[in-house]
Amino acid sequence: MEYFAPKSLNEALSLLDRFGNQAKVIAGGTDVMVDIKYKEEPGCLINIKGISGLAGIKENGGSLSIGPLTTIREIETSALVRDKLPVLWEAAHQFASLQIRNTATIGGNICRASPSGETLTPLLVLEAQAKFAFSDKESREAFSSFFSGPGKTSLGAKGLLTAIDIPYPAAESRGVYLKHAVRGAMDIAMVGVAVLLTPDGAKNNVQDVRIGLGAVAPTPIRAAKTEALLRGKPLTPALLKQAAAMAASEASPIDDQRSSAEYRRWIVAALTRRGLGQAWKSATGKEVAQ
Amino acid sequence: MSFMIKTTINGKEVSASADASTSLLEFLRDTLELKGTKLCCNTGECGACTVIFNGRPINSCVTLAADADGAEITTIEGLAEGDSLHAVQQAFIDTGAVQCGYCTPGYIISVKALLDRTTKPTPEDIEEAVSGNICRCTGYAKIVDAIHLAADRIAGRA
């Protein structure tokens, strides 16, 4: 296995251009090292950790720009993230273990493109954008279209993520990230649900709502039909029940060792109902009427 | 493809060569013969391989040895001073928080990292600090007792 530790973005991009599919990019290593030990060594390993300017959290007016080499622990301990993007903070907080959070990067979590990736549904509901580069061009794309399948993104074999831009949600909005797993720590989600809800000015109706579903489709997805069902309406128990069932029908889960598809659908319904209820209460101060 | 790695382990500078695919755990155990750090799941799930890396606990099995170049690392071998055990080690013995002992070095390193951050850990701090470490023998209660005892001793409360 060849090994490179480029010091600049351009150097890394030209290596990716040269080695393409043979190359594996490594940052924190918490996923890639497992592949190396248990699957197979790539032809060449490109360690991007030494590239300066790809780590850190910066505020740009009404948005946050997070460098892909920022660790999950740095996100979890960022006052700015906790204050402005609590839905992302919650996912970072529930991420694996302290040891892993100290090493794993948000860029790695994104580029791994696992449907259960903890930070991905929060990025979907926050309508965040990926900035990335190839040796001959730069690009920007919403995460809603960035993921194309398990392990597959718009980066292909030759692109490198350079920033994650996250616009601040409306000040009146409230977000919730709920994860269902057997064990809190170190467990991959059977289902993850992110909800971001904005009430109208009078706090009577749902003005806007975004629902992200993780681990229940080939990529993390938005429950667009459920969102459309809820918009402009008061959140009644009947509507909540209808929304939960619709979210379950928007999921296309698989059976695997963690749970059956049927069970995952039940959990999508339960977490959607719980997430909407919690976000509604937090945003309006009101319980969903019984 | 191999290259030289210069790193500081338990306060001592060492340099040795490693292959590109070598993990930090393999580098510690097989190259430097520091066998106190344990190999168990080798996937970053069990915490037996925990070391302190630039002040933070990490899983050495999923860290590239190459990343240790220029880093400061503390392993279980670096805690005792001569015959005098570190307060965390002594507390694990005194509370019976050890059975088979295989997970113990990883626990002790995670707890040392916690008590380096605070000597008044809350139950949440303790849970966070060791939820990445798995013990299949003790049932965890005595490990939590050991953490409280070590914290009290370090802070001079016991």
Image (cartoon, coloured by chain):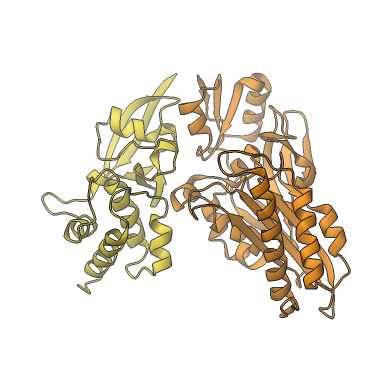
Q: Residue furthest front?
A: A262
Q: Residue at x 81, y 78 (%)?
A: A203
- Residue A259 position within the rendered picture, expressed as x and y whole percent measured from the top left: 59, 44
Q: Is residue A173 above or below residue A216?
A: below
State left or right for residue B116 relative to residue A173.
left
Q: Nearer the viewer, residue A178 or B53?
A: A178
Residue A59 location (% of width, % of height): 68, 60
- The x, y position of residue A52, in whole percent, is 58, 42
Which image quadrant is residue A136 in?
Answer: top right
Q: Compared with residue A25, is residue A198 higher up or lower down, i.e. above or below?
A: below
Q: In this orientation, which residue lies closer to the viewer: A150 or A262?
A: A262
Q: Colour of chain A?
A: orange
Colour of the chain lettered B: yellow
Q: Which residue is painted at 73% across and 80% down in the image? A: A286
- Which of the 4 quarters of the picture holds residue B71? top left
Q: Is residue B108 visible?
A: yes
Taking the spot 80% from the left edge, 69% from the top edge, the residue there is A238
The quarter of the image holding the C terminus of chain A is: bottom right
- Lateral position of residue B47 relative to residue A215, left or right: left
**Most distant residue in the left direction:** B83
Numbered disc total: 0
Residue B14 placement: quadrant: top left
A281 is higher (above) or lower (below) than A258: below
Evaluate whether residue B70 shows in this view. no
- Residue A207 screen position, x and y as percent: 85, 69
Q: Judge from the rendering whether residue A88 lies leftward or rightward of residue A183; answer left or right.
A: right
Q: Is residue A159 above or below residue A242?
A: above
